[in-house]
Image (tube, rainbow, N blue to C red):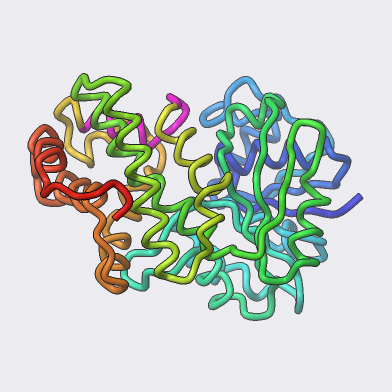
């Protein structure tokens, strides 16, 4: 049994807290939102973001960050990506030398263009970061649906430790030594999922979605390899696997936001209606800057940026994608 802290009581943090508790670990959950902790103490359920998933009585809920960090064998950082830096900075004073921080959000920071593990390492230099990501909707993990995911670290032992902590008969964990490639795949697939949702909102069909998914992973892999990731990472769970589930499922906040944009809403209106953080909106600009840095052509992500930030009509963006210059598929 390990002592595990979970920072963030949204849908993903809550689902992982239940999984870890079911695995026999002693789990403490912290949220900066006091009303979330009050609700979860009273009902043992995240009624706003993960309704129907009842949490074990053994889980401790706290409004004190130190209680969920100090003395823990590992700490799961499960806040939305825009809050990763500020939360990591707040945690730093509680983190001991060599403590494991498991980064489970997905995104690239606008401005610095850092991945989340890079942000955590910068703000908490004394910790050891492991990335945990893959095709994993919280709604299904919370209900015990069979799921596969990847724990990534440049340190094999750290990845294997996290693998052991999370592995169960319904939650299969693989390891990887390419956390940077994993994070790029996890962040950029959200932008492609916005495009897939926009296509759905416009009333297009399965042919269109298949094209967006296939060409989308091509864009992601080209950038990822140019930036130092491994090609096989983008062919696996954190690449094409994560992209498929995010583009196809109604659990996907990015797809749902894209559908609303395709139906005529602005990005701000779509995010307000989804009422959760839509990570792809925050990663889209960063993706374009990384594409410029590594001189990689990313037409789908470029068009998504124009729709989000330049008021381009979604149908015009699709037309421009379809009428680009002719080229061979694998170039």
Exactly how many numbered labels are in the figure? Answer: 0
- Residue 40 in sight: yes
For residue 107, what is the image quadrant? bottom left
In this view, which residue lies farthest toward the front? 328
Residue 297 rendering spot, x and y as whole percentages: 24, 60
**Would you say 39 lies left or right of 326 here?**
right
**Would you say 132 lies left or right of 115 here?**
right
Q: What's the magenta bit mostly, secondary-structure-wise?
A: helix
* Magenta-drawn stretch contains 269: no
In this view, which residue lies farthest toward the right? 1
Residue 87 rendering spot, x and y as whole percentages: 53, 63
Quadrant in which the C terminus appears: bottom left
Residues drawn in magenta: 249-261
Image point (19%, 50%), residue name: 327
Residue 236 rendering spot, x and y as whole percentages: 57, 47
Image point (55%, 76%), residue name: 123
Image point (46%, 58%), residue name: 184
Q: Nearer the viewer, residue 38 or 137?
A: 137
- Residue 86 in sight: no
Residue 140 rendering spot, x and y as whole percentages: 61, 27
Image point (34%, 53%), residue name: 219
* Magenta-drawn stretch contains 255: yes
Q: Nearer the viewer, residue 86 or 32?
A: 86
Q: Is residue 64 above or below residue 326?
A: below
For residue 50, what is the image quadrant? top right
């Amino acid at each position: 049994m390990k002592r595990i802290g979970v920072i963030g009581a949204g849908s993903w943090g809550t689902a992982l807290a239940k999984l870890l508790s079911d695995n026999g670990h002693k789990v403490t959950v912290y949220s900066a939102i006091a009303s979330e902790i009050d609700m979860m103490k009273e009902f043992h359920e995240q009624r706003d973001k993960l309704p129907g998933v009842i949490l074990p009585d053994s889980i401790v809920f706290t409004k004190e960050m130190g209680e969920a960090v100090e003395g823990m064998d590992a700490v799961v950082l499960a806040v939305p990506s825009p809050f990763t830096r500020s939360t990591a900075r707040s945690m730093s004073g509680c983190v001991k030398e060599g403590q494991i921080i498991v980064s489970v959000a997905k995104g690239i920071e606008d401005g610095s263009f850092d991945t989340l593990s890079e942000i955590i390492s910068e703000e908490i230099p004394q910790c050891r970061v492991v990335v945990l990501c893959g095709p994993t909707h919280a709604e299904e993990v919370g209900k015990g649906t069979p799921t596969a995911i990847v724990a990534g670290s440049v340190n094999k032992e750290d990845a294997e430790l996290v693998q052991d902590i999370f592995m169960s008969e319904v939650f299969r964990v693989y390891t990887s030594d390419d956390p940077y490639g994993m994070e790029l795949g996890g962040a950029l697939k959200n932008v492609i999922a916005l495009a897939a949702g926009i296509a759905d909102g416009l009333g297009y069909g399965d042919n269109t979605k298949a094209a967006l998914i296939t060409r989308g992973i091509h864009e992601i892999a080209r950038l990822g390899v140019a930036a130092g990731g491994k090609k096989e990472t983008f062919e696996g769970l954190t690449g094409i696997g994560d992209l498929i589930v995010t583009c196809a499922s109604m659990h996907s906040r990015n797809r749902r936001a894209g559908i609303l944009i395709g139906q005529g809403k602005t990005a701000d209106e779509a995010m307000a209606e989804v009422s959760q953080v839509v990570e792809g909106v925050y990663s889209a600009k960063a993706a374009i800057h990384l594409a410029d840095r590594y001189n990689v052509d990313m037409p789908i992500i470029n068009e998504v940026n124009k729709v989000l930030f330049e008021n381009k009509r979604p149908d015009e963006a699709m037309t421009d994608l379809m009428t680009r210059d002719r080229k061979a598929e694998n170039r």
